[in-house]
Amino acid sequence: MKYRTIGTDPATRREVSVLALGAMLFGSRTDEQTSFAVLDRYVEAGGTFIDTSDNYAFWEDGGQGGQSENLLGRWRRSRGIGDEIVLATKLGARPLAPGTSYVDNPEGLSAKVIRESAERSRERLGVDKLDLLYAHIDDPTVPQQETVEGFAALVAEGTVGLLGVSNQATWRVERARALAGTAGLPGYEVLQYEHTYLRPRTDLPSDLFPDGSLGAAGPDLLGYLRAEPGLTLVAYSPLLKGAYVRPDRLPTDYDHPGTPARLAALRDVARETGATVNQVVLAWLIGGELPVIPLVGVSSVVQLEENLSAVDLELTPEQRARLDAAH
């Protein structure tokens, strides 16, 4: 395994594995025995960065989520896991009532919600401190100052370590970070967005956010990350839920004339390296100029093994240049 540091403050920064494990469906679609086996193998391989959310997986049973955090709590207790594993969770997108969703009825990002939701997550995970806490979606109904101060209060109290943000427009992220900086408060340091080798259309709503809200990392966000080297991008859905090997799963916003050329370049490099297409995608993300940490979701140990092998795949400068140039 390889590692990199997230965060800049010596008091809160953490060293994490360059491959993060997503636990979104653990405890719901992925049964407990399989989930435990995947988690055990990930840790055995040196993995130290596990991701979840307070709303996972509300859509599986029409509830409000919490299954994933509860399972991770049971796994931690049964294995005696301590602070050697960095657990990240999110709040803001939990449905306020069963049968609703984050689109029409989210908990939001008020100071009250931030405090109460973080407390519930700590209880489910069985931890005194959340290593990394994200604002899962934006909440334009709440003043950003309130949200910034709400998250910072938890850091000051020692119940949260690092702060992150997901699925918000770049200008909103910058405004929140500026507010925090001006007030001398901790701000977002880890950004989680959909990011992969293929490029999505930005003029269409994504399959994940049909309401038109932001999901994928676009040129503006990537440019922002280049200008702010202290930030880290955690890339969710890096393998597009199997679309690289199952074209029928390709999301509609990735189905455009530029995609075939990039897929062809990807297959060429896979043949040259003897790796799978998925492994080349992950290696391209891990070894790029930006500090990207792919966040992989798997439903079996076999799938995890394929992803773990990508960590040691080194692309040549020529291969990387060819992949980058394809369009």
Image (tube, helix red, strand yellow):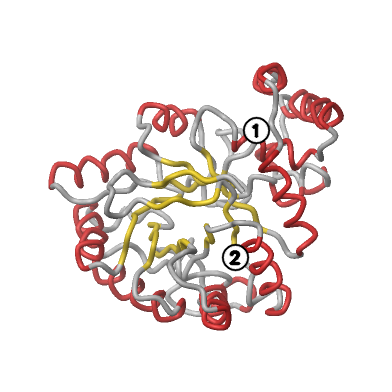
Question: Could you say which is closer to the camera, residue 325 or residue 309?
Answer: 309
Q: Position of residue 104 (x, y in %)?
A: 46, 64
Mark 2, residues whose alpha carbon is within 10 Å: few (<14), some, or many (≥20)? many
63 versus 23 height, above or below: below
* Residue annotated with mark 2: 23
141 versus 35 height, above or below: above
Q: Position of residue 113 (x, y in %)?
A: 30, 70
* Residue annotated with mark 1: 284
Question: Could you say which is closer to the camera, residue 319 or residue 312?
Answer: 312
Q: Is residue 256 visible?
A: yes
Q: Residue at x 40, y 52 (%)?
A: 14
Could you tell me how far apart the alpha carbons at marks 2 and 1 are, in whole angstroms?
23 Å
Q: Position of residue 28 (x, y in %)?
A: 65, 76
At numbered mark 2, what does the secondary structure look like: helix, strand or loop? Answer: loop
- Does residue 249 appear left or right of residue 41 in this picture? right
Q: Position of residue 120 (x, y in %)?
A: 38, 78
Q: Residue at x 46, y 72 (%)?
A: 82
245 versus 114 height, above or below: above
- Does residue 195 appear left or right of residue 316 in this picture? left
Q: Amino acid at mark 1?
A: Trp
Q: Residue at x 38, y 39 (%)?
A: 231
Mark 1, residues whose alpha carbon is within 10 Å: few (<14), some, or many (≥20)? many
The answer to whether the residue labelled 2 contacts the one labelled 1, judged by CB atoms less than 8 Å apart, is no
Q: Residue at x 67, y 33 (%)?
A: 198
Question: Could you say which is closer to the camera, residue 162 or residue 187?
Answer: 162
At numbered mark 1, what does the secondary structure look like: helix, strand or loop? Answer: helix
| The C terminus sits in image quarter | top right
Furthest toward the left, the residue is 183
Q: Which mark is residue 106?
A: none
Q: Amino acid at mark 2?
A: Ala
